[in-house]
Image (spheres, rainbow, N blue to C red):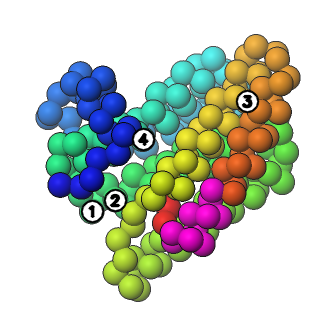
Amino acid sequence: MTQLTITDKILARTVLPFIPNFISPNAVTWFRFATIPFVAYFFATEQYNAGLILFSVSAFSDAVDGSMARTRNRITEWGRTFDPLADKLLIGVAVFILVSRFLNPYLAATVISIEFFIMASALYRKRVYAVPIEAELSGKVKMVLQSLGVVAILIGVVSGIAQFFVVAYYLFYLAIVFAIISLVVYKSI
């Protein structure tokens, strides 16, 4: 069995008991894929309250599927490959629409480019060197920071409190630092 993280242990006691065993971690990843067009629609049509709720649920499902896989010993090669792809698509859509619109299009382009490079690099290493796609701590921290950055933008838009945009800037810049660490030091996603 894979070593459990503190997040796995917390979710195993709080959230996972409410998810029936017949629901696989891969089904949760499929759910995240399925939410992406709706998240994009809500953001593009400026339905930010609905977008905030659906994005938050979808982003949280990233922690859930990984914890389910590890605690229930249901890790699959499909999940190792497609879970990070779902994350990158979800973040990519949110960044493309929200960061471009409310923060800075160059910041959005930077975040999306780094995400693309990280995923392409991981897929290349898997194909050429048979290195499994693994998410290390820095990659997980990056995803959390990016998700919090998106949520900060949405709260700023919904509440009209401009300080949330400043918080979002810092979260995205910090996420870029963790993305570079993830890529250079750990060669992970």
> Mark 3 is on which residue type?
Ile
Residue visible at 25% across and 48% down?
70
Please tell me whether residue 111 is drawn above or below residue 184 in the rendered image: above
> Mark 2 is on which residue type?
Arg
Q: Which residue is mark 3?
A: 153
> Mark 4 is on which residue type?
Asp
**Residue 95: x percent and y percent?**
68, 44
Give the alpha-carbon distance from disc 4 to disc 3, as whole Å.
20 Å
Q: Which residue is mark 1?
A: 77
Give the alpha-carbon distance from disc 2 to disc 3, as whole Å.
29 Å
Q: Which residue is mark 4?
A: 62
Give the alpha-carbon distance from disc 4 to disc 1, as whole Å.
16 Å
Q: Is residue 34 left or right of residue 73?
A: right
Asked which secondary structure carries label 4, the reply is: helix
Q: Is residue 99 visible?
A: no
Q: Which residue is mark 2?
A: 80
Q: Is residue 91 visible?
A: yes
Q: Are marks 4 and 3 in contact (CB under 8 Å)?
A: no
Span of residues in magenta: 178-187
Asked which secondary structure carries label 1, the reply is: helix
Q: Are marks 1 and 2 in contact (CB under 8 Å)?
A: yes
- Residues 7 and 157: in front is 7
